[in-house]
Image (cartoon, rainbow, N blue to C red):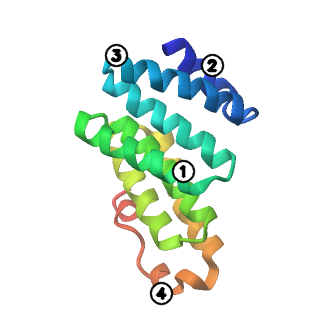
Amino acid sequence: MYRLFQEARRKAEDHPLEALELCEQALQIAQAHGYHPGLAWYLRESGSCYESLVQYDEALSRLGRACEMFEALGIPAGLASATHVIGIIESERGNFPRALECFERYVELARELGRRESFAIGLGNIAETYFGAGGALAGLAATAPESARAA
């Protein structure tokens, strides 16, 4: 199962359909064995594949389920990862307020986990979202996110 996951991660960006196929196999194995952490991670990975394929509704469905599982299982790294991808999708869809919520949560989780690089990436996502949104977030720009103020 882990081998399938690693292979899917390796192929995800350049070959999302192949990666998705591997994720589906891993999901079936995890389900058959009742391996809930694996289910959560494979849902997250398959959500990323659907994001690469621009199938946002399916991506958000899988990522949302992964977030619920990561939360219930107490896996903050997984929650951070899935939340980050949701933020990227919402930004791509033009839902900038939701994207900001996700990126702020990602930054919060990165801080809690002591992951400086992830923290910096999240702050960059927040900045890019404000910049990319232009006038759509003009009213929000005056107030920096709590995560940025506490950095």
Q: Nearer the viewer, residue 114 or 11?
A: 11
Q: Is residue 119 visible to us here?
A: no
| Residue 121 horizontal side relative to residue 12, left or right | left
The answer to whether residue 16 is left or right of residue 6 is right
Q: Nearer the viewer, mark 2 or mark 3?
A: 3
Reading the chain from its start, which is encountered first: label 2 or label 3? 2
Of the residues shown, which amino acid type is indicated by label 4? Gly
Q: Residue at x 48, y 14 (%)?
A: 1
Query: Which mark lies nearer to you, 4 or 3?
Result: 3
What residue did someone put label 4 on?
139
Residue 7 tag number: 2
Farthest-out residue, right:
14
Q: CA distance from mark 2 to mark 3?
A: 20 Å
Residue 36, horizontal then vertical, whole percent:
32, 27
Disc 1 residue type (three-letter): Glu
Measure how far apart labels 1 and 4 are at the Cα level. 31 Å
| Label 4 residue SS | helix
Q: Which mark is residue 58?
A: 1
- Which secondary structure, mark 2? helix
Residue at image coords 47%, 26% = 27
The answer for how far apart the CA atoms under marks 3 and 1 are is 24 Å
Q: Is residue 107 visible?
A: yes
Q: Which mark is residue 33?
A: 3
Q: Return the residue nearer the eye: 63 or 119.
A: 63
